[in-house]
Image: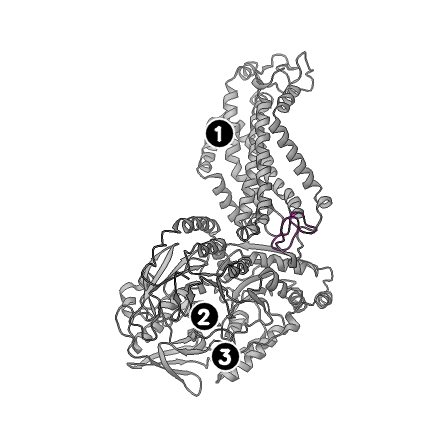
Amino acid sequence: MAPGLNVTGRRATLSALAGVLTAVFALSACGANSAQGDADEVLIIGIESEADVLDPQVAGGWVTWRINSQMYEPLVTHDLRTPSEEAPVPELKPGLAESWEVSEDGKEYTFNIRQGVTFHDGTDLNAEAVEYNIRRMWDEDSPQYSAAAAGQTNFVWQFVEDVTATDEYTVVVRMSQPFSPFLRMLAQGGNGSTGIISPAALEEHGEDIAEHPAGTGPFRFDDRVRGERISLVRNNDYWGEAPALDGVIFRPIPDPAGRTSALRNGEVDVIAVPSPDSVQALVDEGYQLSDGQPPHVWYLSFNMRDEYMSIPEVRQAINLAIDREGISDNLLQGTTEPAYDIQAPANDAYVERADAYGRDLDRARELLAEAGFEDGFTTSLMTSVDGSGQIVPAPMAEFIQQNLAEIGITVEIETMEWISYLGRWAEGAGDVGMMQMSWGMDTPYWLYIVTSSDMIAPSGPNVGYYSNPELDEVMDKAITAATEDEATEYWQRANEIATDDAALAPIVNDRAPYILAPGVEGWVSASQEWYDLTGVTVNPEG
Amino acid sequence: MNTVVEVSSTPGQVSVDPRFGASSRKAKAGRRPSRLILGLRAFGRDKMAVAAAAVLIIVVAAAALAPVLSPYDPVVGDSARRLEGIGSEGHPLGLDGQGRDILSRLIWGARYSLTVAIVPVLAVLPIALLIGLFAGYVQGRVGGVLMRVLDVLFAFPLVLLAIALAAVLGAGLGNVMLAIGISLVPYMARVAYTSTVQESSREYVEAARAGGARTGEILLKELLPNVVSPLLVYATTLCGLMVVLAAGLSFLGVGIVPPTPDWGIMTADGSSVLLEGRAHVATIPGLAILVVALAFNLLGDGLRDALDPRKQTT
């Protein structure tokens, strides 16, 4: 996922053609790059789609943050070197802020900025640079303000009242109310991130910064050929542990079969999102599978303005009729886990609710009968045909269609190409019964983003227009809670309420599989949608 | 089609047709066998065309009898057995990615593929005739403008135009047929126009005009029967192309929507496992598209020859 909320427009045709052309280029480019990594140790990753802009604050989508996060760092980051099994919820760790203090009332955050860090353009990181960046995303009156960056990072800065650099290495952020998810939101990257950019580079290039990236991360920008590759090289002046690799190249190969053959031909060392049906074969051939449990929920939003979906029993019945195990084990060949909560297990507020999300056709039929629809009804489900984090949306929708047919609900599937779909999705469900998306965060605050009355589409991503005063109240308490433990308790209650009322239909949690060539070592699948490449090595001989 | 000379009941209106006669129930078979017989004989000599017609008859029959013939429900799958190959137990053509029976989907798919191919062509036929006859015979400013507008549409390749229209109209069987129909208008109208212009300068039209026939009569009684034949041949060939185009639209996701067992969708479904040792899922519907498209083309060729007097011999 991670919907770039500002993308609109019907570009199905162009995209379809672009897809064909990209596939052709991807094939013709094979071999062109093969001489690349001769002397240097360069890791080539086949990614599932072309990236958005290389401006971390403006870019949307996990695909792009996986690249930007190698070049840019926020104040707070995740420990992505610990695998998912050891850390189901990823630990926060200091990024460009060495440490921080939160005031007693939870409204003031003091960040101690790391000293001796230089940007890729040679300028120094200090408190002023951080303030400059925050004002770009939040302060409409500052000259560097970017509406695009503000739009993408609004969920992070919405309660901020003031930002000041109190001395050379201290930044104080004041908020109008306590906002317990703030630190975790600083580390997010799916929907715009807070990666810090060199102010000197911003002054020089303005909104063109995406063509001249200058961050502080372990890799620096080398070259971008649209539709073909983005290449990064090691930042030898990195403040932390320098990467072992000399460089990394991201190659967009949108066709899953194209990615698989690129891996088999040795043109790439790693592929993202292998087709579920190819995983077992690749493992048998000696490739390595790396996967984890990132906060990745493939879910349906119910349209609360629809005559059927507005009835809780109908929504509960749908949740009980869907065969999540069948989707995970058969259709997706174990590359996902059945989702038993709206939230992914990768956050503290996860509450397993197999009673509400396990399959029970009898109970589902009973609930439908209670609602007066023992003969069923016809509704619609809209999804994309591809896209970031979407797994294989069309076959999954068809599977759900078959499941719901068993309790008498006829589902008409409407599909769109990804970019068109994002625009359509952001508008809200409209006259569609259910809308699908893949999203999630390691902070339970995500529940607020997708179900709160404040976030109703088109001004927010609550595309099903869900509104529940009881849920809103508990979520407000969670947001304004002074401590994280207190917040977690409220979030768990919020999860229970949302599940009991069937606010959404979570279907599966993606295991985010990556297939690695035999020579790749040190790759870690943490409980997050992006990865840390500093510990990775690649031996081309395998 | 009827014999060469027809004396119409109205004195003074004589139409002399060197190629095909205007149809008339009154005309009796003369000493020569009728045109219909001659045409059928010519067609019968074309073995490929006969085979093509046979194939299409079988496909149409399968489509019509789908509920009886298909062994399983085409939209309900058994996910535990998904992707089983050709010859698996109870499923001679195997199962697709959702665990649905490919044979059943193939049979039902014939309905959609044929509908999407034939209906737009048939629907556009009268429209194209009208435009072609009008612009070709009456000409004038309106006719000129009409043909220029169609020329503009010609600037877009057929496939591109259909994709664009389908994307704008949205997916679904009706919209796909509409998109294909609109895209076909310039092509079919152009063929009707060209034959009209050619026929207009022939003696029998001159004769009719000299005889005092009104424009409407000339268009309907003299020109129409002679313009229809080449257009029918062209339309038959187009049907084959439309099977491929419709499948292409579904493949790209702007055509018929899942789980409809359309051959294009079936091919698209199978493409993801094509290289994973499950080639049957995409190959079987792909072959069906190939065979039907080829059959329409061969049938079109056969019709052209059968309707060509020069190839008709006694």
Main SS of the magenta part reads: loop
Q: Amino acid at mark 2?
A: Val
Q: Amino acid at mark 3?
A: Ile
Query: Viewed as shown, does residue A11 lie left or right of B204?
Result: left
Looking at the rendered image, the disc whose residue lies closer to the viewer, 2 or 1, is: 2
Secondary structure state at the residue bearing disc 2: loop
Q: How crowded is the residue under tag 1: few (<14 C-alpha within 10 Å), some, or many (20+)?
A: some
Residue A516 in the image, given as x and y percentages of width and height: 45, 63
Q: Are marks 2 and 1 in contact (CB under 8 Å)?
A: no
Chain for numbered disc 1: B
Q: Position of residue A381 (x, y in %)?
A: 59, 58
Residue A28, numbered circle: none
At mark 1, the secondary structure is helix
Relative image position of residue B204 (x, y in whole percent): 55, 15
Please tell me how crowded label 2 is: few (under 14), some (14-19), or many (20+) other residues with Cα within 10 Å: some
Instruction: Give the residue drawn at x 50%, y 26%.
Output: B194
Q: Please report the bounds of the magenta region as a residue range.
A: B83-102
Name which of mark 3 and mark 2 comes first in the sequence: 3
For the point 58% across and 16% down, the residue is B17
Q: Is residue A96 magenta?
A: no
Q: Are marks 3 and 1 on the same chain?
A: no
Judging from the image, what secondary structure is the residue with disc 3 in? helix
Task: Tell me the CA gap for discs 3 and 2.
Answer: 31 Å
Q: Chain of mark 3?
A: A
Whether residue B249 is visible to the viewer of this picture, yes or no, is yes
Q: Which of the two discs, 3 and 2, sits closer to the camera?
A: 2
- The residue to which callout 3 is attached is A479
The answer to which quarter of the image holds residue A327 is bottom right
**Looking at the image, which is closer to me, B95 or A66?**
B95
Subunit that carries the residue with mark 2:
A
Q: Which residue is mark 2?
A: A524
Residue assigned mark 1: B143
